[in-house]
Amino acid sequence: MKVEIVKFDNLGRGLGYTNNKIIFIPKSVPRDIVEVVITKEKKDYLEGQIKNIIKPSRIRINPICPYFNYCGGCDLQHISLSESLEYKLQKINNLLKQNKIDFEVKDILKSEEQFHYRNKVSFKIEQGQVGFYKNDSHDLIKIDYCYLIPDIVNKLIKDIVILGISDGIITIKINYNQDLLIIIDSINEIENVEKIINTYKVAGIIQNKKIIYGEEYFIHKINNYLFRVSYDSFFQINPFICAKLFDLIVKYTSDSQNILDLYCGVGTLSIVASTNGASVLGVEIVPNAIKDANFNKMINNAQNVEFICSDTKNILKKITNNFDMVILDPPRSGVIKSVISKIIDSQIKKIIYVSCNPATLIRDLKLLLLNYSIENLILLDMFPNSEHVECVCVLNLR
């Protein structure tokens, strides 16, 4: 079946039409003419895979990674960086327009590195083979190199096999100093640990939430800040863009005195927001993250910051008009409705909403915009070669 690709969809797939139905085709590019195989048929749409590129689009480029056409990790290696940035800009503006939100984003902050930027990666291991899953499947692709991760982690891929893991998941975290946290989820007994720690700068090895070597954390450095990050604590994936995010937080918290930071993780945004002299209360549900946050408060001398370990929905009574700003950096599922309602009722003057999922950001904005207006919406290319984009939305009480 021959299909001409019309545009990208919101997941970075090519979109075309055949027999009066929409068809979504991963790894295709607008103005490609492709021969496709149907992989899924629904009432209103089809999904397919490229069998052959009959006529490539003028914007198509050769991906640097040999696994790109099969691996589910990257979406946009087949177009240039400038084209991918334009796609992300258009995607967000289209979502705003479709949801009748009157704001146009003009620009996107670039990452200094398009490759080798990720400070965290998770590998699947099946029958001793290390790799990632194929697009939209649980079929493993064995790999020996990934262009999104630092070379020292790529070197470790080849040595993972000596740990004797036949099945499981291994997550590698790396910091600015190339220290490694190795997190293993497997019932296999680990072998040859000494060979690994003698070859690499290993801060810790954790298996099934138990330390089997070293510590359960290491130190990240972003700008002039130091942050302890435990193996199960969240930290931004791209340190280059994380630095720019910190700059935005400093800029937009300059006039605030009392700040509430919900979903605060290891306290990064709380500590950065306190730079201008504001008092900050951070709330996070993960106990290890709060332990890290209190340590980070100490090493950054952030004396006007306090942290609470709690589910955000359980601290609604603390959301009052005593705060003149709230920072929201929720997981992909977004902010729960009761928290949004409480923020609106408390008439907090300013909101900074940091989001890695435009869909839930838009959903939550539709509620917030009943009482707030958008001062700015900034995009950050946190995930080069992926369709994902980070958003920072600044809102003011009307």
Image (cartoon, rainbow, N blue to C red):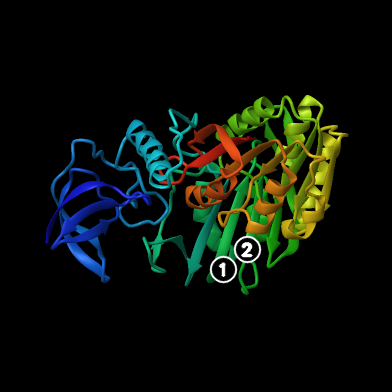
Q: Amino acid at mark 2?
A: Ile
Instruction: Name the secondary structure under disc 2.
Output: strand
For the residues labelled 2 and 1, the Cα–Cα distance comes to: 9 Å
Residue 384 to residue 223: above or below: below
Q: State which quarter of the image contains the N terminus.
A: bottom left
Q: x and y percent of residue 254 in the render? A: 72, 25
- Asked if residue 160 lies left or right of residue 141, the reply is right
Q: State which quarter of the image contains the C terminus.
A: top right
- Asked if residue 315 lies left or right of residue 1, the reply is right
Q: Which residue is mark 1?
A: 165
Q: Which residue is mark 2?
A: 184
Q: Earlier in the sequence, mark 2 or mark 1?
A: 1
Please state which of residues 293 and 189 is positioned toward the viewer in this rendering.
293
Q: x and y percent of residue 276 in the render? A: 77, 25
Q: Nearer the viewer, mark 2 or mark 1?
A: 2
Please state which of residues 124 and 30 is positioned toward the viewer in this rendering.
30
